[in-house]
Amino acid sequence: MATGGGQAAAQPGTAALSKRIAGFLRSNGSRVVLHVDLDAFYAQVEMVRTGSPEDQPLCVQQWQGLIAVNYPARAKGIKRHCTVQEALALCPDIKFVHVATYSKGDHEARYHEDPKYATHKVSLKPYRQASARIFSIIERFVPPAHGVVERASIDEAYAELTEIVNRRIVAKFCAIADGPNGIERATAAWEALEYDEDGPEVEWGPDTCVVGLPDPPKTGDENESTPPERRTRGWQDYQLAEAASLVLDIRQAIRNELGYTCSAGIGSNKMLAKLVSALNKPAKQTALRTGAVLEFMRDLPFTKIRNLGGKFGEEVEAAYGAKNVSDLWKYSREQLQTRLGAQPGSWLYDAVRGVNSDEVVRRNMAQTMMAAKSFRPSVTSMEEVKHWLDVLGWEIHDRITEDFEANGRWAKTLVLHLKSPSLDKSRTCAFPPRHMCDGDIIAARALEMIKSEGEAKALPLMRCSLSAGGLFGDKGNGTIARFFGKKMDATADSGKEGAHVLEGDADVGRLEADGCEQDEDTDNPDNKNIATSSDLNSTSPSIKSFFASKPAIAIEETEEVPESFTCSRCGKSLLKSQQSEHEDYHFALDLSKESRVVLGGAGSGSGGSSVAGVKRKQPPGRSGTSDKKLTSFFKRE
Ligand code: TTP
Ligand code: CA
Ligand code: CA
C-alpha cells in the first residue's frame, strides 16, 4: 500500500501534537526533492519484453546506431556511440534489439525482423507506455494532494516530497499515541528529540548512499546495526532519511511491478537532487545532506550544474577563468550581478552554494502530436509519397487512439507539412471524427491536401509530417488509468514527453559516417550527429502564449536519432550538441519571468531555500526586468 501522506491516528490530543510537529518541521527542516532516472531505459524495456536474463549484454538499436546500452554491455566497454560492428567486436554474445517500427500496412508499430530506414519508421510507443506505467507508480506514492511529480523526460522525474515526508514523520509519532497513556508517551518521545540541541540521530540504512559518508556495508545482513560512521544528526538529515525510505519503497515498487531498476537522488532542491542521482548508477539511491552540500560542490566542474553547461557557462568561464564551483565562491552577489546581469548573477551566486528555488511543476498534456519523416535521398514518385502517408497516417492513428483511451480526447485538426525544393508549407483540414477514422482515412486526407497543392510541386519530397492538433480536455481518467486500477493524473498518463512545441518541428535525415548509418538534422547540414524527430507535439504559436500556461511535457519521439534530444520544456527536437544552449535559453526565459519569488516548493512553506541549514531569503535582484544579457539569450534562440 502506497503511503502518500501518512495517517495521523485519531487519538484525543494527537491533533495538537500533529500540529506541533508539523510546525516544528516547517521551521527547522528543509525542503525534500527527489530526482529519479531509469537505468539504461530503453534497454531495460527490451530486456523485460524479451525476457532477457539480467546479466545478458543488450543494446537497443536504431538502424545502425545504438541508442541504449544496458549495464552488462557497458561493462564490456560498449557505449552509446559504438557501431553495431564495434559492439560485436567487444562482446560477441551481445544481444541487439531494434526499436519497433511501422512499415506499410502496419496499423501499429511492430518489432520487424529487418527494418530498413528506406521503408520503415521508428516508433517509441513501447517506451512511452513503460514511462506512463512508471509515472503512475511514482504518483501513487506522491499523490497530488500532498506532493508534485514533474515528468522531466521519458525516463526522468522530479518529485516534491516535503509535505509527504513531514506527514510521515508526524504519523510516526502519532502512531505511538495508540494505546493507554498514548498521547503522553507520544509527546514524550517527540519532546526527547525536539529538546535535544543536537537534533535527532539519524541512522542511514544500507540502501542509501550518502554523499560524504562511507558506502553502506555490503554484508547483506539486514540485522546488522548501522556503523557509527553512517550515523549523523539533525532535522534535515532526519527528513532526508525518511525520504530515503519512501524512495526505496517507490523504487522497489517499480522493480517488483514492472521489472525496471532506477537510480534516484534526494536533496533539498531540484538542482541538488539531479546532481546526485547519477552518482551511484545503476539501481542505487543517493542522498545529499544539506550539511555536505558545499563540500560536495567544491571540486565539481561548475558546468555540471543545470543551465551552466552551455553558453552561459562559457560566459562565466570566460569572465572569471573559473572551472570548479569553488572558483566562484570568492565573488560577492553584487560582483556577479555587475558582470553577468542582475538575475543571472544572482542566480549563479545561489547556484554555486547549492541554493535553488526551482519548483517541481506538474506539466500539462500535449495538445498536438506529430509524426514526421525526412528523406535522404528525397522521394521522387507519388507512389513513394503514398507509402509514407500511409505509414504516417497509421502512426498518428495509433497514437491518437492510445491518447483517447488514456485521456478521452480527440484531435480537431490535421496538419500536413511538406518540404520540397519549391515548397515549404503547411496545410490544414478537419481531423476525421473518431467513429470513422483510421490510418488510411488520415492518409487519404493528407493526399487530398497534396493534390490541391499540386503534386508536381511536392516532388522531390524532402520531408513530410502529419500533426493531429486541438487535443483539448485533460480528463486523465480513461481506460488506461482504469486498466492499471490507479488514479492517474492527467498530466502523467499521456505517456509522452512533451508537448507544446514552438513553431519548430523536427527533422529526419540520414548520413553515412564511419560505416555507421546516421541521421542528420536537415537544419544543420554540417552536423554529423543524427537528429530526427518524429513526434513532436506542437501547439503554441508563440513563446508568450506558451509560457502563459505551464509547459506540457516534451514528446520524446526522437525517432531515428541517437544523438538528438527533445526539450522537455517546449518539445523542440534538437541535436544533443545544442542541448546546453537551448537550456540556457529557457533558463534566461525563466529568469525574465521570475517576478514571483517562490521558495520552498509545494508544501514546504518555509519561505526560503536553504543549504547547510541556513535559510535564505531570495535577494531582491531575483525578480525584475530582463537586462541586456537576457535579451541576448532570446536573440540567440
Ligand atoms: P538516458 O537517461 O540519457 O540514458 P539511459 O537511460 O539509456 O542510461 P542511464 O542509465 O545512463 O540513464 O536516456 C534515456 C533513454 O533515451 C535511453 O535509454 C534511450 C533514449 N536516448 C536516445 O534515444 N538517444 C540519445 O541520444 C539519448 C541520450 C537517449
Ligand atoms: Ca536514464
Ligand atoms: Ca534520463
Image (cartoon, rainbow, N blue to C red):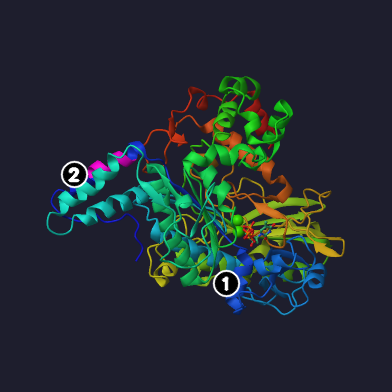
Badge 1: residue crowd in 10 Å (few <14, some 14–19, many ≥20) = some
* Residue 529 at least partly seen: yes
Determine the residue positioned at 47% across, 41% down.
Answer: 290
Q: Position of residue 172 (x, y in %)?
A: 28, 54
Q: Secondary structure at mark 2?
A: helix
Contact check, label 1 and label 2, Cβ < 8 Å: no
Q: Tell me the mark number nearer the camera, choosing from 1 and 2.
A: 2
Under mark 2, the amino acid is: Ala
Specify the farthest residue to the right: 514
Q: Is residue 54 above or below residue 524?
A: below
Q: Quadrant of ligand 2?
A: bottom right
Side (left or right) of 242 relative to 51: left
Q: Position of residue 426 (x, y in %)?
A: 68, 52
Q: Is residue 188 above or below residue 446?
A: above
Determine the residue positioned at 51% across, 37% down.
Answer: 356
* Residue 474 at least partly seen: no
Side (left or right) of 364 relative to 569: left
> Which quarter of the rendering shows the C terminus?
top right
Tell me if the residue at label 1 has its CB under 8 Å from ligand 1.
no
Q: Marks 1 and 2, how far apart in space?
A: 60 Å
- Secondary structure predominantly adopted by residues drawn in magenta: helix
Observer-nearest of 398 and 447: 398
Is 23 contained in the magenta span?
yes
Q: Which residues are magenta?
A: 19-25
Under mark 1, the amino acid is: Asp
Determine the residue positioned at 47% across, 46% down.
Answer: 361
- The label shown at residue 401 is none
Q: Secondary structure at mark 1?
A: loop
Side (left or right) of 407 relative to 527: left
Kindly identify which residue carries mark 1. Answer: 438
Observer-nearest of 216 and 96: 216
Kindly identify which residue carries mark 2. Answer: 16
